[in-house]
Image (cartoon, rainbow, N blue to C red):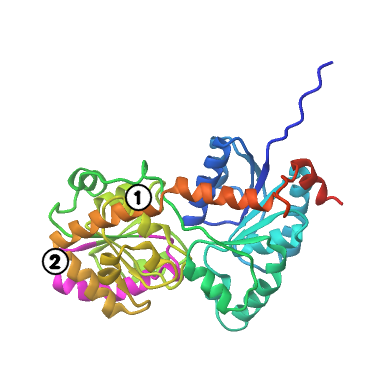
Amino acid sequence: MHQPEPDDRLRVLHLTQPVDGGVPRVVMDLARAQLAAGLHVTVACPAGRLAGDLRSLGADVRHWAATRSPGPSVPGEVRRLVRVLDEVRPDLVHAHSAKAGLAGRLAVRGRIPTVFQPHAWSFEAVGGTTAALALKWERFGARWAHRVVCVSEAERDTGLLAGIAGRWSVIPNGIDPERFHPAPVDTVRAALLPRLDPAAPLVVCVGRLCRQKGQDVLLRAWDAVAAKAPDARLVLVGDGPDGERLRARAPKSVLFAGAVADAAPWYQAADLVVLPSRWEGMALTPLEALACGRPVVVTEVNGARESLPGALAARCLVPAENPAALADAVAALLLDPLLRESLGHQGRRHVLATHDVRDTAEAVADVYRELLTTTEGARVAPTECRESIHS
C-alpha cells in the first residue's frame, strides 16, 4: 500500500487573542503571503470572524479559547496552547499582541524558535500596579522570544528604554495597494451617505471605539472644528467598549458607522482622516488612508512620525490628548482643499514606496529564515524543530 509522503513544508503557528482592528489584518496578510510561498500555516485563535476569514484562505485554524486581557484564565489558556502545540508540531511560533505573547511564551518557553510581535506595548495600555506587572513580565518573558518584531523604531526604543533585553527586528506595517487606492469621492460618498450634502466637509476616524484610539479626545475637539467649518461632518467607523459613552456625548454632526468589513470606502469618501490615538506601535489606519490618497491628522505616538513623509509630519502631527491642537490641525486642513489634495498625493507616494505589505511579508520571512538557520549557516530541518518541543 502506498504510504503518503511526509509533509516537509515549514510549519508556522500564529497565535492571537480576541482582537479587532489592525492585528487581525496583519495576521491575515502574513497568512496569505506565507500560504502563497508554500508554508503550512496554522493559526490558533478564538472563534470569530478572523477564524472564518483564515479558513477561506486555506489556513489551518485551531480554536483557542482565550480572553483579551491577562487574568485568572491564563493557566488554562496556556494548557490549551500546549495541546495545540502537541497537535500542530510547528517549526516556528509567531505570537501577536500582549496576551498571546504571554500565553505563547509560557507554553513554548523557548524550546522552538519563537517570534513575539507586541503591536504596541502592554504596559502603555494600563497604569499603576497593572502597568508595573506588565512591564515586569515583558522584561522576564523576553528570554523566551528568539526575536521581538516591532512595527516601528519608536516602538523598539520604548521597549529598550523600559529595560526589555530583546533581540530586535523592526519591520514597519504594510498595506495592500490593490485594496487601498483612490476612488472618486462623490461616487463613494453617495453610496455610503446618500443623505449627506455632497459639499459638506467629511472627516473620518477609523478604529476600535476604545480609550487607546482617543475618539473621546476628537469629540472634545469637534466643537472647535465645527465653529470654523459649520457644515463639517464626522464619522466614527468601528465598534468597541466605549461606543455607548461616545454616542451619548456626540453632537448631531457626528455619525457612527459601526464595525465594517472593509474600511477602504470610508477612507475614499473622506476629505480628511483623523486618528487621535493615545498609544500605538504603528497604526494601520494612517497608512491605509494615505494609500487611498487622503491626508491624515494623527497624534505623535509611536510609529506616527515614521508613517508620514516630511510635509505631512510638519502639518499633520499633533500632541496626544490635546483637543485644542487637534481641532486647529483638523480645521486648517478642512478649510484648505488644495493643501489636502497635495498632501494626499504625497502621502500615497510615500506609502507605496515604504509600506507595501509584500515587503513587510518578505521581511518577516527573512526573520524566519534567520531563526531557522544555525550559526554555521546550515538550515535547521523542520523535523528537528518539531521534535525539540517534545524533548
Q: Residue at x 40, y 45 (%)?
A: 176
Instruction: Give residue 109's position: percent from left, percent from top.
Output: 76, 61
Residue picked out by circle 2: 335
Of residues 203 and 320, the one nearer the viewer is: 320
User: How many numbered discs sit on the rendered protein?
Assistant: 2
Residue picked out by circle 1: 352
Q: Residue at x 22, y 64 (%)?
A: 253
Instruction: Give residue 148's position: percent from left, percent from top.
Output: 61, 63
In primary-sequence order, the first of circles 1 and 2 is: 2
331 w.r.t. 97: above or below: below
Q: Residue furthest front?
A: 376
Instruction: Give residue 341's position: percent from left, percent from top.
Output: 18, 56
Q: Secondary structure at mark 1?
A: helix
Image-quadrant location for residue 272: bottom left
Q: Is residue 213 magenta?
A: yes
Q: Residue at x 23, y 49 (%)?
A: 193
Q: Is residue 198 magenta?
A: no
Of residues 207 and 350, the one nearer the viewer is: 350
Distance from Cα at disc 1 to Cα at disc 2: 27 Å
Q: Secondary structure at mark 2?
A: loop
| Residue type, label 2 | Leu
Say whether marks 1 and 2 touch (CB < 8 Å): no
Instruction: Give residue 289's position: percent from left, percent from top.
Output: 32, 55
Q: Could you tell me if residue 237 is visible in this image?
A: no
| Residue type, label 1 | Leu
Question: Chief secondary structure of the magenta span?
Answer: helix
Residue range in magenta is 206-233
| Number of other residues with Cα within 10 Å of mark 1, as a class: few under 14, some 14 to 19, many 20 or more | some
Q: Could you tell me if residue 188 is visible in this image?
A: yes
